[in-house]
Image (cartoon, helix red, strand yellow):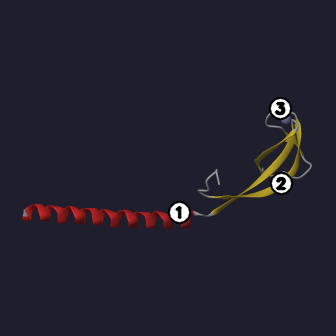
Amino acid sequence: MNLDNQMIDLYAVIVFLSLIASLAYMIVQAHIRRSKRVEVQRVVSVIECCGKRITRQFSKGDYVGKEVECSECKEKGRIIAIFVERIEAGKKKNL
Ligand SMILES: [Zn+2]
């Protein structure tokens, strides 16, 4: 009987410790996620062609009004905008 109680105590201690461990793990993970939330910037060029707007990464020499090859139809498209896109690292798409 006494042994059973000790076993239960031991079990309670293990459960308690694992709870503490998982809590600590969650705190560490949350901290890492927060510190990882670094804004990534990239410059993109918007090309108008095929009746739509195609966004691609800015390449050296790009300027608004420049004629560039459309990545879809290989015809001449035109850069209509260049802007800096901010991407939050680890950001979920469905937000
Ligand atoms: Zn095109």
- Determine whether, in the image, residue 14 is placed left or right of residue 1: right
x, y percentage for residue 43?
76, 55
| Above or below 4: residue 50 | above
x, y percentage for residue 46?
83, 48
Question: Who's the residue at 81% across and 50% down the image?
Answer: 45
x, y percentage for residue 75?
87, 33
Question: Who's the residue at 83% across and 32% down the image?
Answer: 73
Q: Bin the neighbour count of mark 1 within 10 Å (Cα to Cα): few under 14, some 14-19, many 20 and up.
A: few
Q: Earlier in the sequence, mark 3 or mark 2?
A: 3
Residue nearer the viewer, 75 or 20: 20
Residue, disc 1: 33
Q: CA distance from mark 1 to mark 2?
A: 30 Å
Q: Amino acid at mark 3?
A: Cys
Residue, disc 2: 82
Callout 3: CB less than 8 Å from ligand 1: yes
Question: Of helix, strand and loop, which one carries label 1?
Answer: helix
Which label number is shown at residue 4? Answer: none
Q: Amino acid at mark 1?
A: Arg
- Determine whether, in the image, residue 2 is placed left or right of residue 47: left
Residue, disc 3: 73
Quadrant of the drawing holding the N terminus: bottom left
Q: Amino acid at mark 2?
A: Ile
Q: Earlier in the sequence, mark 1 or mark 2?
A: 1
Q: Quadrant of ligand 1?
A: top right
Residue nearer the viewer, 13 or 33: 13
Question: Who's the residue at 46% across and 63% down the image?
Answer: 29
Q: CA distance from mark 3 to mark 2?
A: 21 Å
Q: CA distance from mark 1 to mark 3?
A: 41 Å
Tell me if label 1 and label 3 are in contact, CB under 8 Å.
no
Question: Of helix, strand and loop, which one carries label 3?
Answer: loop
Q: Bin the neighbour count of mark 2 within 10 Å (Cα to Cα): few under 14, some 14-19, many 20 and up.
A: some
x, y percentage for residue 16?
29, 66
